[in-house]
């Protein structure tokens, strides 16, 4: 417990320091490579502090010449640094717009190259979705957690439509991403950090053509879930 508390305190201090660094730097320099570099530096430093080792499987399925949506399960708040630090791609996070209200951390999201989604209804929500689609079409590869929230028991939850709707509208492939091991490092409703090894497993990209968008969404969801279930280890 003492080791876990120390890791948690150091991680929080590092996160605040780097968020301030990003907030001060990014309005002056809109270079997306700088933003991704800061995010990757934070992720890898956090993993090192907490004793987390990442093993990547299926790296041959990464194609940096075109954008895609990485559709992943969600087991822990450590999923984000694990993916950003472990995948050799410049990935944008899709986050809830309300996170921008968080002092320092939220400001870093707002002024960076990540994609904010308004999950409400009405014109603002539609506008944020259109902006997300356009960014993806222009070459932004994004990470989306298809369960919508972290699992509470280590099992896969039902998938949400959001990632598949964006993929169909943007006309980009979906790469199923299975994360094994983060649940035991920091489970939901816990702040205790345990060292460990995380496996990131990439499956072949899935791109469907057709006239009916709803049907493509449904088929994408089925195929992505099948790929993740095949690789997933109940935690």
Image (tube, rainbow, N blue to C red):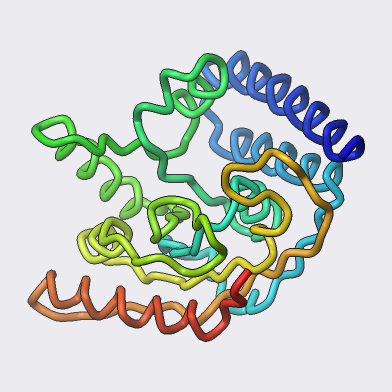
| Residue 58, placed above or below residue 93 | below
Name the foreground residue: 121 vs 211.
Answer: 121
User: Position of 232 compared to 139: left or right?
Assistant: right
| Residue 219, placed above or below residue 192 | below
Count up the numbered dots. Answer: 0
User: Position of 142 compared to 20: left or right?
Assistant: left
| Residue 125, placed above or below residue 144 | above
Which residue is depicted at the point 68% across and 34% down?
Answer: 38
Q: Give the percent coordinates (x, y) of residue 57.
A: 68, 77
User: Position of 67 compared to 181: left or right?
Assistant: left
Q: Quadrant of residue 89?
A: bottom right
Which residue is depicted at the point 59% across and 74% down?
Answer: 234
Which residue is depicted at the point 50% across and 57% down?
Answer: 151
Which residue is depicted at the point 63% across and 69% down?
Answer: 235
Q: Give the percent coordinates (x, y) of residue 63.
A: 53, 70
| Residue 136, placed above or below residue 112 | below
Q: Give the percent coordinates (x, y) of residue 12.
A: 73, 27
Quarter of the image with the N terminus is top right
In the displayed image of the protein, which residue is found farthest to the right?
3
Name the foreground residue: 183 vs 105.
Answer: 183
Name the foreground residue: 183 vs 129.
Answer: 183
Q: Give the percent coordinates (x, y) of residue 34.
A: 63, 34
Q: Quadrant of residue 167?
A: bottom left
Q: Quadrant of residue 99?
A: top left
Name the foreground residue: 139 vs 125.
Answer: 125
């Amino acid at each position: 417990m003492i080791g876990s508390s120390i890791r948690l305190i150091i991680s929080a201090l590092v996160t605040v320091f780097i968020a301030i660094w990003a907030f001060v730097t990014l309005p002056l320099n809109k270079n997306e490579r700088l933003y991704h570099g800061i995010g990757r530096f934070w992720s890898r430093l956090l993993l090192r502090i907490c004793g987390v080792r990442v093993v990547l499987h299926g790296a041959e399925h990464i194609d940096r010449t075109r954008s895609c949506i990485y559709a992943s399960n969600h087991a822990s708040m450590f999923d984000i640094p694990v993916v950003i630090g472990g995948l050799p791609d410049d990935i944008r996070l899709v986050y809830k717009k309300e996170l921008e209200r968080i002092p320092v951390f939220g400001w870093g999201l707002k002024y960076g190259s990540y994609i904010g989604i308004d999950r409400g209804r009405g014109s603002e929500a539609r506008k944020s979705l259109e902006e997300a689609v356009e960014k993806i079409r222009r070459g932004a590869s994004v990470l989306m957690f298809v369960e919508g929230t972290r699992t509470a028991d280590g099992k896969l939850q039902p998938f949400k439509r959001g990632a598949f709707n964006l993929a169909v509208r943007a006309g980009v492939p979906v790469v199923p991403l299975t994360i094994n091991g983060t649940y035991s490092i920091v489970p939901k409703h816990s702040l205790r950090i345990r060292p460990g090894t995380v496996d990131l497993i990439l499956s072949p990209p899935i791109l469907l053509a057709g006239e009916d968008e709803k049907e493509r969404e449904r088929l994408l969801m089925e195929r992505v879930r099948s790929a993740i279930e095949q690789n997933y280890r109940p935690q």
